[in-house]
Amino acid sequence: MKFYDCATAPSPRRVRIFIAEKKADIPTVQVDLRAAEHLTEAFRAKNPRCTVPVLELDDGTCLGETIAICDYLESIYPQAPLLGRTPKERALVLMWNHWIEDLGFSAAAEAFRNSAPSFKDRALAGPENFEQIPALAERGRKRIGLFYRLLNEQLARQAYVAGEVFTLADITALVVADFAQRLKLAPADSCGAFLTWHQRVSARSGAVA
Ligand SMILES: N[C@@H](CCC(=O)N[C@@H](CS)C(=O)NCC(=O)O)C(=O)O
């Protein structure tokens, strides 16, 4: 197996944390997005969407989507389950993970990619160029508040996003929160439950991945 990563990008960080939580040792290749290595023919052959993370299996099959990679890794490293231990838990982890991607990740990405000068004409990840739309950056900055509020309400009721144990939903929320804070989109002080959870999950050894 080979993991195609980019140390500065949020999506592959989700897989890095997942691997660290599993205590798995997977050879890793850094893909330099700034040097457009993901747009080369060689990388496109692995993932036609030209994004990281990618997990290349020993038979050459390439998985080019975080949830697919995590699902595969969960099957081969079942210890320390991160996708739930029962059908109900699994469904809740997947639901929260999707909500966090939808509300949080896409809002932060929208805010960042539609405003950062270095992403001029690269407003969407992938092989095609798209121009920045400043109004989308503004909308993303507003939308991130919905993510913080939803998570704060949930974390006021329970220790982790999808229940009483740490899961992929926490990994995705942690990565979104750290990405948003890099963009100066921190949660309001009123999001106390979220801030307490953030401190707790940031202290896990895998969080530094
Ligand atoms: N839904 C995809 C998103 C992957 C994604 O957007 N990755 C970004 C890095 S965070 C990327 O590869 N960007 C390449 C680009 O900017 O063209 C996943 O989670 O695998």
Image: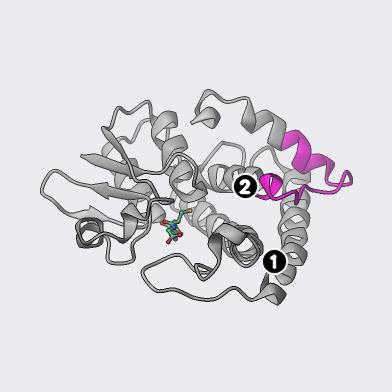
Q: Nearer the viewer, residue 46 or 71?
A: 46
Q: Is 189 inside the magenta-drawn segment? A: yes
Label 1, residues with CA under 10 Å away: few <14, some 14-19, many ≥20? many
Q: Which residues are magenta?
A: 180-197
Mark 2, residue position: 179
Whether tag 2 and tag 1 are in contact, CB under 8 A, the answer is: no
Q: Is residue 114 left or right of residue 60?
A: right
Q: Quadrant of ligand 1?
A: bottom left
What element does badge 2 sit on?
Answer: helix
Residues under labels 2 and 1: Cα distance?
A: 13 Å
What element does badge 1 sit on?
Answer: helix
Residue at 55% in and 48% down: 172
How far across and how far down the image is residue 35, in percent?
Answer: 38, 51
Label 2, residues with CA under 10 Å away: few <14, some 14-19, many ≥20? many
In the image, residue 1 above or below residue 64: above
How far across and how far down the image is residue 182, in percent?
Answer: 67, 45
In the image, residue 197 above or below residue 182: above
Residue at 33% in and 62% down: 50
Mark 1, residue position: 140
Amino acid type for the residue under numbered disc 1? Gly
How far across and how far down the image is residue 46, in percent?
Answer: 22, 57
How far across and how far down the image is residue 80, in percent?
Answer: 42, 31
